[in-house]
Each structure stands twice: as structure tokens, then as C-alpha cells.
Image (tube, rainbow, N blue to C red):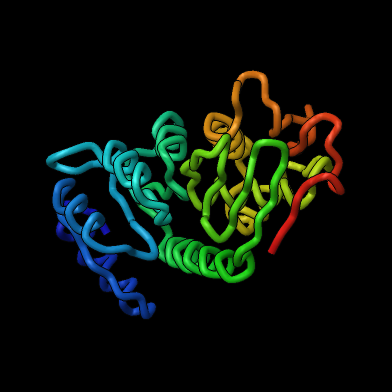
Amino acid sequence: MVEDDAVSQQVLQRLLESEGHVVVTASSYHEGVTMIDRQPYDLVLLDLILGDGDGLDLCRRIRASHQTPIMIITSRGGSADVVSGLELGADDYVVKPFNVDELTARIRAQLRRTSDKRRSEGGEQIRIGDLLIDAGLRDAIVDGHRAGLTNKELELLILLARHLGRAIAKEEILDHLFGGEVRSEKILAVYIRRLRKKVEPDPDNPTYLHTVRGFGYRLGVKGLSADDADRRR
């Protein structure tokens, strides 16, 4: 947990430890950077308002080199802040003041989904044209280079790849990604835009990830059927 307010840090730490979580804390931007680079964590809880730096910059820095899920917990609840946080790689965004039961449920869900996905996806690989989705690697390969996907981006890509060529409704995608906790199509659009920037040769003219207007999204290359895709476990 990266939180520079001592009272908030202590209250949240005690709450999470009472739920059985092991919590380590950082009280500044620079302390957070040092700790996150030193060892892996299951989840990062990140405040945006830090005395020695901007939490959005820290989110960007974490995501540049780690796939650890990030949950932003902050009093900055403006739409632009939420969109910026998600575009920079956060997996969830919670605005203070928060409901304690809801927060702990979302933390449990985040940890559970990450663990379940790693177990279920195993070494699955799906190749679509020049795009290779490698669940074991926890990333996609585009023209021989790693795309640097976050966990949520990978979940989204695998969901669409498993239904290659078929349109998936926005509501179904949100249920899959957030377990019914998030219903915002704007947030989904952020993930789609971010994913296109990482896997598409031209994000403005997608080759793989297509919008089905008024319904949802579809993954597929024109002329390539689900039977043509290379799937391995």
C-alpha cells in the first residue's frame, strides 16, 4: 500500500490484516518505487496524492516494468482522473470516502480473479495472424515483440480470442473483467483503446480488435475463421 496519510494508512492496514492479508506499506512515492522494484506483490493499493510525487506517474512507472494488479484508492474522483488512471494501467479505481465492505470485497475479487486466471489459463497459446496470445507468458507477442499487457488487458484479449470471430456484448465483457462490480462502458472503452495501442499495427484502423456498433467487440482478422487460428495448450 502506497499511502502518505498516516491515519488512512493505519486504518486500511488494520482492516486488511483483519481479513487475513499480509500488508506492507510505503509512505511516499520514492519509498513505493524502491519497495515495488525490490520484490513482487500480489496487489498494489495506490493513493494518487503523494507528498513527493504524483500517484499517476507512479502507476505509469509500475506498469512499465511489472504486471502486478494496481488498485487506485484516492479522493480524486473526477472522470478525467479515473480515465487517466485506467489508461495508465490501473486495474480498478476506488474513490474516497469508500464503503469498507465494498472495498474489501473488491480487493478479494481482484486477488481471486488473478489467481484463478493464472491457474485456468496455464500455458495456453492462441495465434491470430501475426498476433500471438501467450497465457503462460502473461502477454501477447506482436511481430516478435512483447506487447506489455496488463492483467486486465490480457483477460480481455483471451476472452475475445476464445470466441474468435464472434461479437461479445459489452455487458458480458464487463461481467468477465469485473464480476459485475463495474458497469461503465466508458471504462471498457479505455481498456479497448489501450489494448489497440499495444497490439494493432494501426490503432485507428484495427486489424484484430473490431467494434460492433451498438453491441460490443469482436476479435478476428478478415477471412480468418476460428478453425484457422492456431490454439495450443
Q: How many marks can you see? A: 0
Seen in the image, is 209 located left or right of residue 150?
A: right
Residue at x 43%, y 61% (from the top left corner):
103
Q: Give above or below for 203 relative to 24.
A: above
Residue 55 on image: x %, y %: 27, 41
Q: Residue 195's image quarter? A: top right
Residue under the point 64% across and 39% down: 131
Residue 201 x/y as whole percent: 59, 25
**Considering depth in this image, is 191 or 147 the residue closer to the camera?**
147
Residue 81: percent from left, percent from top: 39, 33
User: Could you tell whether 131 is left or right of 12 in the image?
Assistant: right
Q: Residue at x 32, y 46 (%)?
A: 62
Left or right relative to 216: residue 139 = left
Query: Is residue 172 or residue 101 the one in the foreground?
Result: 172
86 left or right, relative to 50: right
Q: Quadrant of the image for the C terminus?
A: bottom right
Q: Residue at x 23, y 41 (%)?
A: 49
**Residue 5 visible in the current orientation:** no
Task: Using the rendered view, name the quadrant where residue 64 is placed.
Answer: top left
